[in-house]
Image: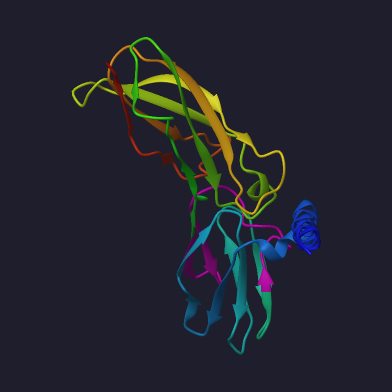
């Protein structure tokens, strides 16, 4: 019975993986938002959406309305009672930022795109080590991505900073790559580690700030500060 339940769980998980690996099937997992085109204008006038979201324009008026984004991403005529998803099924383009558009070439509105969530952690086996010994800082990296990386974890660089006390500035001691899980998981994350030699009391923090070329896609993530002291 236990083995049967395990096989069912594995099959369900692999089914999700299969859906995510095919673009045509993954659209249902992407966040979607709706703007209503009314007689008095678009509602809401400023829509807040996440990167990689679907934006629907639904015409609740009795006459047709046109929409046109200033960056050229979308231009469409929406008939009364109809709905249009700009980009012919593609997700919202670009990166975090504000994207203005007009309705009927007169009313101004915009879509404010926010970056994907991201979180990083940092810890060690304990807080106290002998002077000169090597110890391992390690942690996890997670992202709120509805696509395939969400099942394995992201492969992104993590920067580690240190300082001896609050009177000193943080200085970077290493950049390591967070490695995704080998198999899909219900608790997806990547793992990273960095070996450090203890020369004095210090505090450490991990930061994930990498972005794709062209703009901001992920939130800046910072771990809690972790203190290490020289043990006698």
Image quarter for residue 199? Answer: top left
Q: Residue at x 79, y 64 (%)?
A: 1
Q: Does the magenta stretch include residue 88?
A: yes
Residue farthest to the top, as pictured? 132
Q: Residue at x 60, y 60 (%)?
A: 53
Residue 210: x and y, percent? Answer: 51, 34
Please give left or right for residue 73 compared with residue 39 in the image.
right
Residue 198: x and y, percent? Answer: 36, 15
Q: Height in image: 85 above or below 133?
A: below
Q: Height in image: 115 above or below 85?
A: above
Residue farthest to the front, as pictured? 1
Identify the image quadrant of the C terminus: top left
Q: Residue at x 47, y 35 (%)?
A: 208
Please give left or right for residue 27 compared with residue 228 in the image.
right
Q: Height in image: 197 above or below 20?
A: above
Magenta region: which residues?
84-111
Q: Nearer the viewer, residue 103 or 116?
A: 116
Colour approach in the figure: rainbow
Please give left or right for residue 4 compared with residue 92 in the image.
right
Residue farthest to the left, as pictured? 167
Please give left or right for residue 120 compared with residue 166 in the image.
right
Q: Is residue 105 magenta?
A: yes
Q: Which of 192 and 21 is in front in this view?
A: 192
Residue 36: x and y, percent? Answer: 55, 78
């Amino acid at each position: 019975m236990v083995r049967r339940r395990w096989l069912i769980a594995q099959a369900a998980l692999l089914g999700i993986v299969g859906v995510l690996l095919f673009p045509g099937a993954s659209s249902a997992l992407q966040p979607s938002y709706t703007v209503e085109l009314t007689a008095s204008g678009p509602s809401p006038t400023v829509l807040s959406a996440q990167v990689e979201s679907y934006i629907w324009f639904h015409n609740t008026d009795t006459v047709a309305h046109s929409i046109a984004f200033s960056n050229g991403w979308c231009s469409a005529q929406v008939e009364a009672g109809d709905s249009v998803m700009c980009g012919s099924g593609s997700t919202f383009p670009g990166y975090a930022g504000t994207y203005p558009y007009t309705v009927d070439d007169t009313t101004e509105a915009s879509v404010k795109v926010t970056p994907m969530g991201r979180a990083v952690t940092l810890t060690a086996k304990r807080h106290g080590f002998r002077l000169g010994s090597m110890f391992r800082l390690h942690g996890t990296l997670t992202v709120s991505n509805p696509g395939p990386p969400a099942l394995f974890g992201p492969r992104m660089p993590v920067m580690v900073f240190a300082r001896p006390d609050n009177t000193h500035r943080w200085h970077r001691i290493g950049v390591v790559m967070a490695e995704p899980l080998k198999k899909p998981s219900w608790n997806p994350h990547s793992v990273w580690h960095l070996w450090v030699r203890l020369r004095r009391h210090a505090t450490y923090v991990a930061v994930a700030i990498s972005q794709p070329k062209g703009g901001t896609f992920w939130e800046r993530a910072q771990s809690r500060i972790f203190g290490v002291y020289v043990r006698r």
